[in-house]
Image: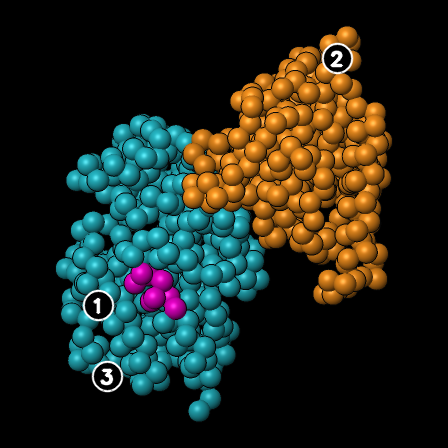
């Protein structure tokens, strides 16, 4: 494990240098975090990454489904891109302002690479050659009651406009297994609004269960060059549907082939 | 009436408002160095002392009234106004009524008189505080970002209102007078006594443990130089002033190498009140220790060139440390 991280550390240092970037990423801190997350990633969640060959050494806009009540899925995707991809990188997840405003957690997440989900930030990061991770379902995606598990929520269009403006390729991605972290969940939306938090899941378990995770990376999707920056929503709609469908297909494939708790215990 | 273009504006007679400030003194020295024939008249509502002894420089303490300013405009045939007299945020100047009077009423009078007496150029020093420090601020705010400085703290109302008043006036009168509004990031230097410099230099000042926002710093010399260059070269507009490098608050404190007490932010605010005599940091700037308010400098660099800054943020902090 330590040899693996020494090699990753070297590659990341070459890519990011030693200093913080303007968004607060501290490369050495990010690597230290990876070392802490890795045992959970590898042993607890037993993450498998499929479709690594689709990732080249260039910036991407990684578009994923959002599941699991708490954003552990984002953390696992970032760990996969830093440790399992041929050209390791620190993915920059675009996060809600709620996270950036939190004490300790806001600081920790930005030092590890998270960035406020904002159009200027996204474009500036892509221009600098960074890869960003977006969850176009937003909070609606992650905060679902048990009956809605794995139902893809409607995507917002913002990410398409940013991909259009930056010419970045879109990498569709699906995480399968995260909904089982908290299998029995109830959302009390009124209470969440009262407490001014994005979501308030009430779960039977407090700690995420060791559900085996599969990350499926799809083939890159490029928006046609003929599409103007000011394209109408109707012109973007077919591309939005295609990306949604691609992620839905990856999810369904993953669900058919997923490992159960029992199978995992056997292995 | 024809007016000179911004690029060829030669200053002959300059009024500096807020001459008692360290930045104003450095600016006056730079102006004299660049043009020994220049005439500078400095005014301030505060008691004036430790002024550089230069034949080109005269100064006086006065109340910022219309009558007093009219007298100065009549007597000095001014072509350039450098308004560096915005009151800062130290608790000693914390009287909100006095600040509103000087920052709004005084500035309005000066702008009116500048036009009445056919001045060619007005440079106004605003601040990055107009944007406000918010958890949802983009990194690198452009000049057209909304001014949200007073959303949470009424104490910053006059700062935002002064900026808005100047920019409204600027666009309204752009055909008759060139006006430049500068919004600098944190100005630091051995002679500057603003809130952030005091914070960094004060031993055992509380440093938030749970937040580490990114900061930009401009050295006092670079700032003075940019004010001079703005008066000579910039055309009407708003310009953010910040270098290319961004540094975190904790890194900045580390470079200054003054012992700090690291505590959660909830305690910083309380300690700020208790330690006021020792640590003069206004509570309404605490958010700047939590969230970033960093500036996009592309407009300034496009007009003044990429090499306008002599010191980067680290060098500016090192220079502050060595004093």
Asked if badges 3 and 2 are on one and the same chain, I answer no
Residue A129, by quadrant, is top right
Q: Is residue B145 magenta?
A: no
- The residue positioned 59% from the left and 18% from the top of the image is A36
Side of B17 where B310 appears, left or right: right
The answer for which chain carries disc 2 is A
Q: Are marks 1 and 3 in contact (CB under 8 Å)?
A: no
Vertical arrangement, residue A5 with respect to residue A74, above or below: above
Check the picture and name the quadrant holding the N terminus of chain B: bottom left
Side of B190 where B228 appears, left or right: right
By secondary structure, the bulk of the magenta-drawn segment is best described as helix
Rate crowding at label 2 as few (under 14), some (14 to 19) or many (20 or more) other CA atoms within 10 Å: few
In the image, farthest residue toward the top: A266
Residue B101's tag is 1
Which residue is disc 2 drawn over?
A: A262
**Residue A227, image x, y percentages:** 80, 61
Q: Which chain is orange?
A: A
Asked if badges 1 and 3 are on one and the same chain, I answer yes
Q: CA distance from mark 2 to mark 1?
A: 74 Å
Q: Chain B: what color?
A: cyan
Mark 3 vs mark 2: give the one in front.
2
- The residue positioned 72% from the left and 35% from the top of the image is A150
- In this picture the colour scheme is by chain
SS state under label 1: helix
Side of A25 where A178 appears, left or right: right
Q: CA distance from mark 1 to mark 3?
A: 23 Å
SS state under label 3: helix
The answer for which chain carries disc 3 is B
Residue B210 visible in rendering:
yes
Which residue is at the front of the view, A189 or A72?
A: A189
SS state under label 2: helix
Vertical arrangement, residue B135 with respect to residue A112, above or below: below
């Amino acid at each position: 494990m330590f040899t693996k991280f020494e090699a990753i550390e070297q590659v990341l240092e070459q890519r990011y240098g030693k200093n913080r970037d303007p968004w607060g990423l501290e490369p050495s801190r990010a690597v230290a975090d990876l070392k802490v997350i890795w045992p959970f990633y590898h042993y607890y969640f037993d993450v498998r990454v499929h479709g690594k060959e689709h990732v080249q050494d260039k910036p991407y806009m990684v578009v994923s489904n959002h599941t699991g009540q708490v954003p552990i899925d984002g953390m696992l995707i970032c760990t996969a891109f830093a440790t399992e991809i041929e050209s390791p990188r620190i993915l920059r997840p675009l996060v809600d302002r709620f996270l950036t405003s939190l004490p300790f957690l806001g600081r920790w997440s930005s030092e590890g690479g998270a960035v406020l989900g904002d159009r200027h930030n996204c474009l500036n990061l892509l221009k600098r050659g960074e890869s960003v991770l977006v969850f176009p379902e937003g909070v609606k995606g992650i905060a679902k009651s048990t009956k809605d598990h794995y139902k893809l929520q409607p995507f917002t269009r913002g990410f398409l406009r940013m991909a259009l403006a930056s010419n970045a390729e879109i990498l569709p991605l699906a995480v399968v297994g995260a909904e089982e972290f908290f299998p029995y969940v109830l959302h009390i939306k009124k209470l969440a609004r009262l407490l001014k938090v994005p979501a308030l899941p009430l779960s039977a378990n407090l700690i995420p269960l060791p559900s085996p995770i599969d990350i499926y990376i799809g083939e890159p999707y490029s928006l046609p060059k003929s599409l103007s920056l000011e394209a109408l929503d109707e012109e973007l709609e077919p591309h939005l549907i295609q990306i949604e469908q691609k992620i839905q297909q990856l999810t369904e494939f993953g669900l058919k082939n997923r490992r159960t708790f029992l199978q995992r215990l056997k292995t | 009436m024809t007016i000179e273009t911004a690029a060829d504006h030669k200053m002959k007679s300059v009024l500096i408002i807020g001459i008692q400030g360290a930045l104003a003194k450095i600016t006056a020295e730079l102006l004299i160095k660049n043009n020994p024939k220049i005439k500078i008249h400095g005014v301030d509502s505060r008691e004036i002392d430790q002024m550089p002894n230069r034949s080109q420089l005269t100064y006086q303490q006065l109340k910022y009234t219309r009558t007093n300013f009219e007298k100065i405009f009549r007597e000095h045939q001014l072509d350039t106004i450098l308004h560096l007299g915005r009151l800062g945020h130290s608790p000693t100047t914390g009287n909100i009524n006095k600040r509103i009077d000087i920052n709004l009423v005084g500035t309005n009078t000066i702008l009116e008189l500048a036009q009445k007496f056919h001045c060619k150029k007005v440079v106004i020093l605003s601040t990055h505080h107009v944007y406000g420090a918010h958890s949802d601020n983009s990194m690198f705010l452009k000049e057209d970002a909304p001014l949200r400085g007073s959303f949470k703290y009424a104490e910053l109302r006059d700062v935002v209102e002064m900026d808005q008043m100047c920019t409204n006036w600027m666009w309204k009168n752009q055909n008759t007078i060139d006006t430049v509004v500068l919004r600098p990031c944190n100005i630091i230097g051995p002679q500057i006594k603003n809130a952030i410099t005091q914070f960094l230099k004060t031993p055992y000042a509380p440093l938030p443990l749970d937040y580490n926002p990114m900061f930009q710093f401009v050295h006092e010399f670079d700032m003075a130089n940019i004010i001079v260059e703005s008066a000579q070269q910039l055309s009407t507009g708003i310009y953010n002033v910040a270098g290319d490098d961004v540094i975190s608050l904790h890194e900045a404190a580390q470079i200054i190498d003054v012992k700090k007490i690291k505590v959660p932010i909830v305690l910083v605010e309380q300690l700020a009140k208790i330690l006021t005599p020792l640590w003069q940091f206004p509570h309404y700037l605490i958010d700047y220790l939590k969230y970033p308010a960093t500036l996009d400098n592309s407009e300034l660099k496009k007009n003044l060139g990429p090499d306008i800054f002599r010191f980067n943020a680290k060098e500016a902090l090192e220079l502050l440390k060595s004093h």
